[in-house]
Structures are given as C-alpha cells and as structure tokens.
C-alpha cells in the first residue's frame, strides 16, 4: 500500500439509499478516503447500460459523514462520471454493492453491480463487486462486511493488476457457518423466463418478467458449486467476450 | 437447411422505426418466416439491461406485411418475451440490427444490438448482430444488406452451434470498395469520457456524456484492424467473462 491514503469509490445498483451500500461504505472507510456515487433509484438488471440519449443530473449529499453524490443515470454512468468529472484524482479502488441478491453464474452479465465494477477495471482501476445471496431489504450484512474487509485489505496490499475485476458472492449465512473463500470460474447457467400476463384497469394486457434459474454446469471449480458448499466465491472477470473456441470453425464465413 | 421454413426473429436497439431494422427485415424475408420484436423507442447503449422493476407492454403492428411487435422494454427484453411468450415455436435464427453505428471492440458490451444477439445465443438460438459504421438516419444500407444476406445464408446452411453469436460490423463503404470478410477477435480499446457541463433554465447543472474512443491494440487479427482495412469484421462472442489468466495470480485470496 502506498503512503498516500487510498481513495476508494463506492458505487452500487440498488440505489444510494440501499442498506447494502451503507454496509460497504462502513467497510471502505477503514481503508482511506471514500467517495460514493450511486444511482438515485434502484437500477437492478441494468447490465452495462449507459445514458446516451438523455442528460445526467448529480446531487451532492452526505452519507455518514462521507462525500456522496446521487446520480440520475445507470451504475456504469456513476463510475464514468465519478472518474472523469467528480473526483480530483484517480481512485485506487472501486467497490460496488453490497448487492441485495446473487450475481453468480450468468447473472453477472445482467448485473448493474458487476457492470459498474467492470467499468472501473476498464478505467484501469482495480475493482470489486460484492453481492449477498439475500434479496431482502432486511438482509444481515455482517458476514458480507467481514469478507469484504478481508478481500479489500488483500487487494490493496497486493498490486495484482490495474485491470483486475472481482465478482464476489457471499452465502446468506452467519460468519461462523461460511466455509472459506474459493477463486472460481463463472458457472454455465441460464434463466428460463416466464411472463406473468395481467390486465390493467383499462383492459390492456401487460407482463411481468419472472423465471427460474437453471444451472447446466456442476463443475467443482464454479461459483455455483462454491456457494452451494457455503464458500464465498470470487470470479475474476474481464471484458473480452470473443468466442476463441468458435473462431476456427467459422472461418468459412471469410469466403461468402 | 431443414425442410421446414426457418423462423427468423428480428430485433434491434435503435427502435422499431429505425431504417436499419427495415433493411434487416427485407433481407430476413428471403429466408423464411419473419417475426419482428423491437423496442418502441431508441435503446442504444442499453447493454444487457432487462426490465425487472416495471411492467412490459407489447403492441402488435405490421411492417411491410411482416408480423411485428413493439415492446416497451430493452433489446434483451424483446428477445426474452419473443422466445418465451410471443412465438409459437423456437426461432431458427435471431438477427439484430442493422445498427446505426459501430459495435466493434469494447462497444460490444455497451451495445443493445449485441446484447440482444447474445441473449438469443443464451436461449440456444444461433444469433447474429449486424452494425453499419454510420450513425446517420440516412445511412446507405445496401452493402450491409448484401453481406447480411451472404452471412445469414451461410449460417443457416451450416449448423455451427446453437450457442453461436456473431458480432458483424460493416464498413461505411459501397459494396465494391469492401475488401471481403475477416473472422476476428475483439480489439482491446476503451472510451475516454468527457462530460459536457451545462446549466438548465432553472440554474441547475446537468451533463451530457461525450468522449473519444481509444484503441490500445493494433493486432491484425482484431475487428478494428479489419474495419480500418475495409473488411467486414465478424467476431464470435460468448457470455463467459471469467478472467482465466488472472485466476492463478489471485489464489492467495483463498487464505484471507
């Protein structure tokens, strides 16, 4: 760790008033100067969305004596405007969350929490997204805070890579029931959607997205396996989605 | 190609009234039955966003005698509700676009066009996103249509993989100036953002996102190289974002 006090940017996708971000701010404060930039409303499932067609609005507020800004945009907008406009120096670390609900397996690509963390890594700032496997507003964040503290300390002490991004998921268990930490790969899985069809008071049909998550991958090296076996899962992620395995097979497309 | 007439789902992110989707519908009609499900308004930069916290509304319309639905949701919502609710059988192919503007390099992760295509592959339907390197509403789609036709024909004739997803970018050139087709990897690049600060009539500050794209990667196997050299670029993409290279380095996190 350098002698300068680390600057830590805290973001999330559940919005600036979510209990999870307060838990993460409390942890981050132990390590240095903290600035919070978070959406002014819940932005779950926003993936890597950015605001292109409308304006962004920022309000400066205070959360537990920490400098904070609420932002009208998406989680990724929060990181971009923090790094490029609101902060006077580059953060040493971006932490995102603590999300209310899992971001394991394929959920990572829908997740505003993890997209904000990945955006931090794209800005060449080591970044970590934290998610607790409990959607409730009343979730107990004490075990998640314990592991967030340990992981942040280890990342600040080890200069792994400026482009490092970690997807950390924490089982919904008390600290003494958690088996430890596993570095994993993203399990292969998918959502089988169902659409709940309803009729509004004007007689028009509308839909709510529902569905169930299906795991297609029982590998013991996956985040899903780790979480099912009471481990905290850490999946390092990166933004190159090229399908290198398929590249050779489709070379014939060069002859069309 | 099977004897049954292929069912092709057409989606986009520029909205159901964009010229680019009309160009793609015209091409898709040559190959079988076409159904269009597209956002009712522009949804550029929506990434893999889905609608979780609000309702979805669908309107059945007709575009050039093709069955079409406008959807109040994101590009990914369009694919999910098409496959799981609106269509009576699984499509043989999802095509997305033709996008007004490039989705090469890192743009792929911000792109609604490509996220919709990737969602098709997650539904185990071969999927292709097409983008033309011209943002204009008056863009000339004739070369893009020519290559879309060739690529769709080749994909339908070759059963590459149900989970195949192709990111096709087409230079903004007439057909005779295009050098051919290259299968590539995603170039490493990033946006350097700037925020244009303005004051509204009430005296409040707001921001517009602007920025410039910076390529950090001159590999001749990249999409950026292909496009700069007048080739159509095809990058196969997939949804596992695990950073396998970093996994070993961060194993010490298991001891925190």
Image: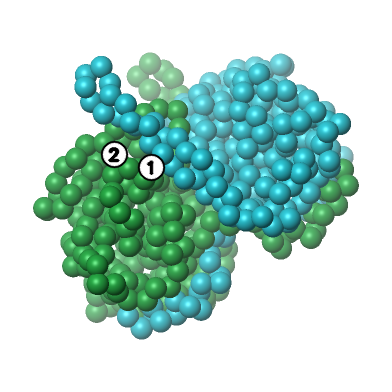
Chain colours: A green, B cyan
**Residue at figure coordinates x 79%, y 49% from the top left:** B182
Is residue A224 in view from this perspective?
no
Q: Which residue is painted at 58% across and 46% down in the image?
A: B108
Q: Which mark is residue A31?
A: none
SS category of the residue bearing label 1: helix
Q: Is A198 located above or below residue B84 in the figure?
A: above
Q: Quadrant of residue A218?
A: bottom right
Residue at mark 1: chain: A
Residue B68: image location, x then y, percent? 63, 23
What residue lies at 23% left-to-right and 43% top-to-bottom? Answer: A69
Task: Tell me the element at label 2.
Answer: strand
Query: Quadrant location of residue B156?
Result: top right
> In the rendered image, which quarter contains the C terminus of chain A?
top right
Q: Are marks 1 and 2 on the same chain?
A: yes
Judging by the rendered image, the residue that carries numbered circle 1 is A77
Residue B233 at x, y percent in the picture? 73, 45
**Residue B28 lies in what quarter of the image?**
top right
Residue drawn at (33%, 55%) of the image:
A90
- The N terminus of chain A: image quadrant: bottom left
Instruction: Report crowding for label 2: few under 14, some 14 to 19, many 20 or more residues within 10 A (C-alpha).
Output: many
Neighbourhood count class around disc 1 (C-alpha, 10 Å): few under 14, some 14–19, many 20 upward: many
Tag 1 near tag 2, CB within 8 Å: yes
Q: Is residue B134 above or below residue B251?
A: above
- Give residue A71's mark: 2
> How many angstroms separate mark 1 from mark 2 (CA)?
8 Å
Q: Earlier in the sequence, mark 1 or mark 2?
A: 2
Q: Is residue A10 left or right of residue A188?
A: left
Q: Position of residue A151 (x, y in %)?
A: 32, 72
Q: Position of residue B110 (x, y in %)?
A: 52, 43
Residue A183: in sight, yes or no?
yes
Q: Is residue A110 left or right of residue A178?
A: right
């Amino acid at each position: 760790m350098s002698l300068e006090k680390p600057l830590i940017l805290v973001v999330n996708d559940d919005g600036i008033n979510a209990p999870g971000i307060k838990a993460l701010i409390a942890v981050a404060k132990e390590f240095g100067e903290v600035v919070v930039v978070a959406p002014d409303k819940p932005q779950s499932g926003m993936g890597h969305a950015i605001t292109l067609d409308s304006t962004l609005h920022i309000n400066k507020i205070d959360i537990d004596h920490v400098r904070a800004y609420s932002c009208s945009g998406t989680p990724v907008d929060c990181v971009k405007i923090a790094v490029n406009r609101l902060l006077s120096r580059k953060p040493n670390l971006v932490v995102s969350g603590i999300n209310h609900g899992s971001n394991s397996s394929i959920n990572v690509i829908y997740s505003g929490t993890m997209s904000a963390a990945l955006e931090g890594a794209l800005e060449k700032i080591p970044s970590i997204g934290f998610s607790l496997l409990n959607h409730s507003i009343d979730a107990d964040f004490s075990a998640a805070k314990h592991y967030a503290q340990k992981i942040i300390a280890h990342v600040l002490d080890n200069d792994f890579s400026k482009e490092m991004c970690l997807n950390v998921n924490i089982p919904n268990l008390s600290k003494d029931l958690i088996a430890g930490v596993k570095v994993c790969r993203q399990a292969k899985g998918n959502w089988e959607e169902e659409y709940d069809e309803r009729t509004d008071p004007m007689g028009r049909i509308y839909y709510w997205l529902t569905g169930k998550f299906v795991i297609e991958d029982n590998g013991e090296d996956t985040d899903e396996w780790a979480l099912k076996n009471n481990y905290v899962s850490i999946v390092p992620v990166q933004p190159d989605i090229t399908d290198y395995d398929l590249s050779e097979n489709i070379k014939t497309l060069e002859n069309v």
